[in-house]
Amino acid sequence: MKKTKQLFSIFMLSIVLFMAGCSNNAESSTSGEKQEGPTTVTFWHSMGGAAQEALNSIVEEYNSSQDKVKINAEYQGTYDEALTKFHTVAGTESAPTMMQVFEIGTKSMINSGFVEPIQTLIDEDGYDMSGLEENITNYYKIDDTFYSMPFNSSTPVMYYNKDAFKAAGLDPEKAPATFEEVEEAGKAITKANPEMKGFALQAYGWLYEQLLANQGALLMNNDNGRTETPTEIGFTDEQGKSIFQWVKRMIDAKTFANYGTNGDNMVAGFLAGDVAMFMQSSASARDVIDNAPFDVGVAFIPHPEAVERQGVVIGGASLWMMKDKSDEEKKAAWEFMKYLQTKEVQAKWHVGTGYFAINPDAYSEQVVTEAYEKMPQLKVTVEQLQSTKSSYATQGALMDMIPEGRRISETALETVYNGGDVEETYSNMVKQFNEAIEKANRARK
């Protein structure tokens, strides 16, 4: 009886081992086979409103145009919210294949260690980046390496009410080019219409940086962090104070409209006729022009008359690839990135959103030329970008603490708007900015 039980146990064990072997062989067989159906690419983005509609349309067209890749575009909230979420899931299966990140998140993404520089794909594919807009690619090229693909790019422009200019006896076709000309125009406008202010500047760090760059000023030393990690601010006292002093003169002249940090209220004030001029992203051009009950002018951003105009720094976002995904998934994402840069897609994106075309050939597409005939102001935004002088100042700064730096400059601007002393406010801003740089450098050691 005991021998029978032993034989039965051996027989059952043999069956178990045989089944396990079959299972392993089956797994080995299927894992070596290519999965059927398209490769899925998870794409995180932060586009809302009209830009999200335009992006979804492009994604749908791409998915319908072929059957090898399927792009799943997923909205992740604001740029800040999306970047925070990425750092929470980076390196896990929950991370996306590719992701849209704002320009000042560049260093944060590189330092994360979880990204695949697109230079890898560029080199493997022999892709020519020189065909893209140079003043855009200049920002994203770091030490001769492209870490991400430019996508939605914009710069600030100055919007102005042409009807208000006419009423004040000003030439509506000649926008103020300097700080001083903006001041004089503001006085004439307020004199003609006491209910209207001359100029508004949102307390927004990005706009402060742009007004510095237009003077040829660096935000941070070491060539804006492009040759070495910054250790302190890069602008002089004269450059940094000039913006605060400009605003203070308009406040004293009672021609400045204070909307604080609220850009939406500023645009609403412009559309309501409460202020005649303001600075904002070129990506807002279509919405502003379409909704204004008056003729809107679009012009280059101003600069102090004592210095020559240098141009603007590219803003917006780029597309990043995650390194821990399969080669198949990364190549699929790369194909979509290249598709987005085609002149046809970029023409549609430019006209549908107001963002620049990364591929300058898009500007000769019929959909763009027709849009320019109806809305010539859109062309001004492109002209300002293309006339920008390439330098470390207009390339923009690179460092992981720039979001904090912007909050510091925004607080300083608001302080001046509300009556704070320029000298004291500027001094405090510089001290806090340098401390933030020092703190960020200590954290990385």
Image (cartoon, rainbow, N blue to C red):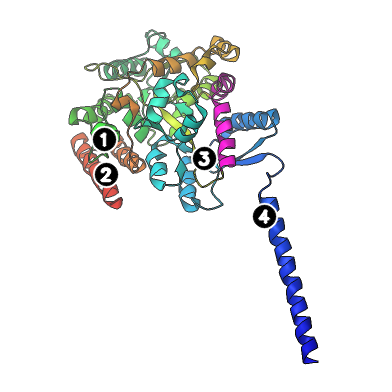
Confirm whether the magenta stretch covers residue 438.
no
Looking at numbered disc 3 in the image, what kind of residue is underneath it? Met
Q: Residue at x 53, y 43 (%)?
A: 77
Q: Quadrant of residue 216?
A: top left
Mark 2 closeness class: few <14, some 14–19, many ≥20 residues within 10 Å: many
- Which numbered tag is attached to residue 99? 3
Tell me if I can see residue 195 in this picture. Answer: no
Q: Which residue is mark 2?
A: 437
**For residue 68, which quarter of the picture?**
top right
| Relative vertical location of residue 327 with respect to residue 59 in this rendering, above or below | below
Position of 180 with respect to 56 (left or right) is left
Q: Say what amino acid the circle numbered 1 marks.
A: Met
Question: Is residue 222 or residue 216 the one in the foreground?
Answer: 222
Place residue 232 in its image quadrant.
top left
Which of disc 4 and disc 3 is earlier in sequence? 4
Disc on the earlier residue, 3 or 2 = 3
The magenta segment: 327-353
How far, Cα to Cα, is label 4 from label 2? Answer: 52 Å
Q: Amino acid at mark 2?
A: Ile
> What secondary structure is marked by label 1?
loop
Q: Which residue is mark 4?
A: 28
Mark 3–mark 1 CB contact (< 8 Å): no
Callout 1 touching callout 2 (CB < 8 Å): yes
Q: Position of residue 202 (x, y in %)?
A: 38, 32
Which of the numbered marks, if any, corresponds to residue 220? Answer: 1
Residue 417 position within the rendered picture, expressed as x and y whole percent measured from the top left: 30, 34
Please tell me which of labels 4 and 1 falls first in the chain: 4
